[in-house]
Amino acid sequence: MDVSFLGGPQPQRGVGVVAPFDFALDRELWRWVPDEISLHLTRTPFVPVEVSLDLARLVSEHETLDEAVRALAAAEPEVVAYACTSGSFVGGIAGERAMCEAMHRAGELPSVTTSGALLEALAELGARRIALVTPYTASVTESLEAYLGEAGTTVTGRAYLGLTRHIWKVPYRDVAAMAREAVGPGADALFISCTNLPTYDVIPQLEAELRIPVISANQVTMWSALKRLGTRAVGPYQALLDPAARRQWPLPEQHRQLPEGQQEGGFA
């Protein structure tokens, strides 16, 4: 069969993705990407350390980033994204900025990280008070809260699993249960952390139930990277991706008042 009349394939634009060695959700990242965009993924070298602050530091060393971005350069991406939440918040805001600068030097490309994209997404939504869901241990979760606090964001409630491995195996029902535990009155949005935690299908369901925007690590990473290409992430009725989906909820400053006696910033 002669298919020359098709004239394809169509030209692709690329997003380079640096992920931790244990990242298992490549397919989930692709679900946010429009057809004309390709993802080019590489992983950091294996280290025999469980999910922890030590691991976050090891997979975000500038030498590691430099090697990963240079490897991606062969595929000629137009933007580079570091897809790891803990690895990009463990050094605070200054550390996240330094990571972006290191990736930019290595590839001379616009560079984003998951934690930087998180702050960008919160600004897009006008959210300053958020509920937090993580699969992490208490210490890693507290480090994320410190990063958010440094950026002027209040955590109103949290729930975490305490896992140190196999995070990609957590089912949606556990993510939803944590969300219900974490979200209380006064939250502008819910953030589900960790790029290794599945979230794509649960986001619209949680938004419908909780009546606030729900954002996740993989979602904000792809949203931010694609913005730098002048295009949009795709997804079913997700508030971050579709401004029309936000109109069903009040703006943050119009949110319901906290119940009498509940303190600003108190955990649910």
Image (tube, helix red, strand yellow):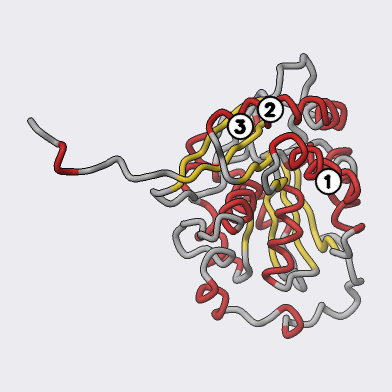
Of 126 and 209, the residue lying toward us:
126
Q: Quadrant of the C terminus?
A: bottom right
Label 1 crowding class (10 Å Cα cut-off): few <14, some 14-19, many 20+? Answer: many
Identify the element where label 2 is drawn. helix
The amino acid marked with disc number 3 is Ala
Label 3 crowding class (10 Å Cα cut-off): few <14, some 14-19, many 20+? Answer: some
x and y, in percent, of residue 5 in the image:
14, 43
The amino acid marked with disc number 1 is Glu
x and y, in percent, of residue 174 in the image:
61, 43
Instruction: Tell me the residue at 14%/36% (across/down).
Output: 3
| Residue at which label 2 appears | 68
Q: Determine the CA span between mark 1 and mark 2.
A: 17 Å
Which one is in front in this view, the residue at disc 2 or the one at disc 3? 3
Q: Is residue 79 above or below residue 73?
A: below
- The mark nearer the N terminus, 2 or 3, is 2
Which numbered circle lies on residue 73?
3
| Residue at which label 1 appears | 96
Q: Is residue 188 left or right of residue 225?
A: right
